[in-house]
Amino acid sequence: MEILAHAGSPRAVVVVFHGGFWRARYEADLMDALCRDLAARDYEAWNVEYRRLGAAGGWPATFEDAARVVERARERGLPLVTLGHSAGGHLALWAGASGATLAVSQAGVADLAEAWRLGLSRNAAGELLGGSPDEVPERYAQASPAERLPLGVPQLLVHGRRDDTVPAEMSRAYAEQARRTGDVVELVETDEGHFECLDPSSESWAAIVERLP
């Protein structure tokens, strides 16, 4: 894990989870540019690596890593933001439920059962959890933000309408469901695709930074 911090007192700790459908060939450097931007804005950015599929990850190891780093971040005694892109958006929502000030999902896989039904990235959700929702329903109940609602923390979902990797409808449906359970959720839709939000100059990133504590 790399920690980037601007000199002085940080405004908050932002725990950042990268995407890549939880697979080992994708690493934390995907989030380097965003973490540098956060540090320049006086945030302490934790660019997290976690065990991934093909590198000892999956259920429950990936989730243990995410929970452990958020627990460490809470010990800093600062406002805590969990933030992630795609599969990292899933982890940001999941881990943020343990006490984040704000959980931010960028084009996130918020509903693992729906991801399995859609076959996203060759059924990556099934690979992550070791089976389908019918085969291991208890794992989906524990691992999917959509099935753990209400999360009990404020949530920000940012999703591009042109996303052909994780459909924006997943964030729309999740936001509606979360609000029905009493969670405070804001959904921001942009005209971007799946990867533009990794650029600090993007419309979606601007929407995020203006809402950070």
Image: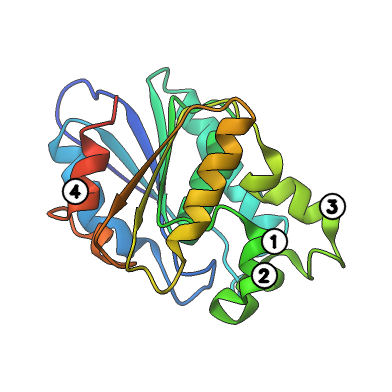
Amino acid type, mark 1:
Ala
What residue is pinned by disc 4? Answer: 36
For marks 3 and 4, the one nearer the N-term is 4
What residue is pinned by disc 2? Answer: 116
Tell me the residue at 61%/66% (across/down).
Answer: 115
In space, the residues marked 1 and 3 are separated at their CA atoms by 12 Å
Residue furthest toward the bottom?
A: 122
For marks 4 and 1, the one nearer the N-term is 4
Tell me, for residue 138, which label it has, or none.
3
SS class of the residue under badge 1? helix
For marks 2 and 4, the one nearer the N-term is 4
What residue is pinned by disc 1? Answer: 113
Q: Where's residue 62, x and y in %?
A: 62, 56
Amino acid type, mark 2:
Trp
In space, the residues marked 2 and 3 are separated at their CA atoms by 15 Å
Q: Is residue 4 above or below residue 17?
A: above
Q: Where's residue 35, x and y in %?
A: 25, 48
Closer to the eye: label 2 or 3: 2
Tell me the residue at 52%/27% (across/down).
Answer: 153
Q: State the count of labels.
A: 4
In space, the residues marked 2 and 4 are separated at their CA atoms by 33 Å
Quarter location, residue 186: top left
For marks 2 and 3, the one nearer the N-term is 2
Closer to the eye: label 3 or 4: 3
